[in-house]
Image: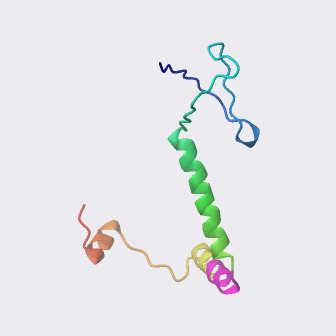
Amino acid sequence: MLSGIKQQVVVGKDGKIEIQTSELTEGTVVEVIVLVEQDATQTDNSQSTSQDETEYLLSTEANRHRLMSAIQNVETKNNLISFTPEEWNEEYNLRS
């Protein structure tokens, strides 16, 4: 017979998860399923992706130069192309 125990816990150092309950006796074989809140996972993934993109953009001298040049253009408002959402939709045939 299967029974379930549901607890919300905080992941500790090095990913350690501890469940404390008097319902389990020492030596009992259990199956563990870990459900992670989606927001926490997405935040970690987006930070990882951002870091990967940054590393790529800075990986070569040419990439670094192009990135720094683009940042300077934005800061000085040079070589920028501006358009309205309507102009964008008209140019690319997007319908909302």
User: In the drawing, does residue 25 fall left or right of residue 91?
Assistant: right
Could you say where residue 54 lies in the image, as x and y percent from the top left? 64, 69
- Quarter where residue 52 is shown: bottom right
- Which residue corresponds to the image point at 68% horizontal and 33% vertical from the top-left? 17
Main secondary structure along the magenta-highlighted residues: helix
> Please, which residue is most extreme toward the right here?
13
What residue do we see at 53% from left, 43% from top? 39
Q: Residue furthest top?
A: 22
> Is 69 above or below relative to 45?
below
Residue 70: name its quadrant. bottom right
Total numbered labels placed on residues in the image: 0
Residue at 69%, 28% in the rendered image: 18
Q: Point out the stretch of residues depicted in magenta.
A: 60-68
Q: How is the image coloured?
A: rainbow
Percent x, y for residue 65? Answer: 67, 84
Front-lying residue, 15 or 49: 15
Q: In the image shown, does 64 or 91 lie closer to the viewer?
A: 64
In the depicted structure, whether residue 1 falls above or below residue 77: above
Task: Tell me residue 94's x, y (percent).
Answer: 26, 69
Image: 4 above or below 16: above
Q: Picture quarter containing residue 75?
A: bottom right
Residue 83 locus on image (x, y percent): 38, 73
* Horizontal side of residue 83 vs 25, given as left or right: left
Give the vertical position of 78 relative to 47 (above or below).
below
Q: Residue at 62% across / 26% down in the picture?
A: 29
Report the quarter where the C terminus lies. bottom left
Residue 46 magenta-highlighted = no
Magenta span includes 61: yes
